Image (tube, rainbow, N blue to C red):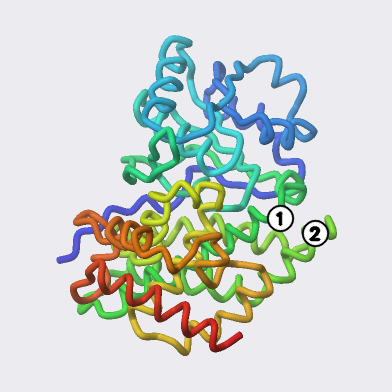
Amino acid sequence: MVEIEVRGAPTYYACQAGILDQLEELLTRYKKKNCLVVHGEKSWNSIKPYFPVNLSEQLSFVPYNGECSDTEINRISNISTEGNFDAIIGIGGGKVLDVVKAAGNATDLDVILIPTLASTCAAWTPLSVIYTEQGEFIRYTVFPKSTLMVLIEPRAILHSPTSYLVAGIGDTLAKWYEADVIIRDLDEKPLVVTIAHQAAKLCKDVLLTYGSQAVQDQKNEHLTSTFIKVIEANIIPSGMVGGFGDRYGRIAGAHAIHNGLTTLEETHHLLHGEKVAYGILVQLALEGNWEEIKQLQSFYESLNLPLTFQDLGLNVINKEKLLQIAEAAVLPNESIHLMPGIITADDVLKAINSLESFIVKQI
């Protein structure tokens, strides 16, 4: 019997223009009076026009320090404990939300998340990705309970940088390729794993169908149903893949390549989803699935997602750094080992080099 832990959704979710006008009522409904708000500077500026003025005067605000590290999680946890807060509200992108989830777990406080970007599924998933202060990946931590509330004000995300939406599309697209490579060959597929598999397929279908138009809608500052469909795809089914699939639906090769890339300081300017998008292609190269890479190429080009090392700002000729990425991607605890067979650093090196040659021939 396959054992699965399901944490499929937050207690309350809404995505609609003006949803924050209901925040005070929602806090009262869930008996949350004294709340700490953790935010980035840019994220607060983006949400402030939609945030109730009366309520903001009743809350305590603290800025986020810029990285989801153990140090930052401990700092927010200590502030939360010392202030005797009922809940922590996180406003921002994935790293801000991950800090808040981790601090909420450490202090046993409920968490309310207001994403200002659609760059990851961080608003939905009951886990945090932990980095060093320098931005190098350390670990994933999965928490025992889901978020209390997720509230999306789509107008705030509409006015966010387009690069974050594109990165979110890259990260969400990986849900299909990483879940599928794990789930498709399972002898026994529990219903919850099938739900995860279907959610992953939904991610791919929505993004390949509507992703390019949603990016164009954002550039034109048009709040359309297509735009909302794509930002929700980046958050809801993306989070459901791991929420229902547990270890069968979280990550595989693409995220391991991302983690390897984080060991190079030259990649720290890249967004999470940009590195994951490249990781999808390396995973497919490891599988020998060149036809799928060929099919994805035009989609990547339409969104300016990285297809090659050069697109990442790296030089494939630098063998030492290539080896550093490959070795980090195949560390014993890495998710690449959830793929079939034994994968070594040499396999990753060969996949990267083969991918470079393949893409160059297609251009």
Percent x, y for residue 256? 35, 60
Query: Residue 168 sits in which quadrant?
Result: bottom right
Q: Which of the pair 113/313 is nearer the observer?
A: 313
For numbered disc 2, what is the local secondary structure? helix
Percent x, y for residue 300? 60, 73
Above/below status of 329 relative to 206: above
Query: Residue 350 sits in which quadrant?
Result: bottom left
Q: Quick check: can you spot residue 250?
A: no
Above/below status of 298 relative to 282: below
Give the mark, 2 or 1, whose residue is nearer the N terminus: 1
For numbered disc 1, what is the local secondary structure? helix
Above/below status of 222 relative to 137: below
Separation of marks 2 and 1 at Cα, in angstroms: 7 Å
- Badge 2: residue crowd in 10 Å (few <14, some 14–19, many ≥20): some
Q: Which mark is residue 219?
A: 2
Residue displayed at 28% across by 53% down? 5
Q: Quick check: can you spot residue 163?
A: yes
Q: Which mark is residue 162?
A: 1
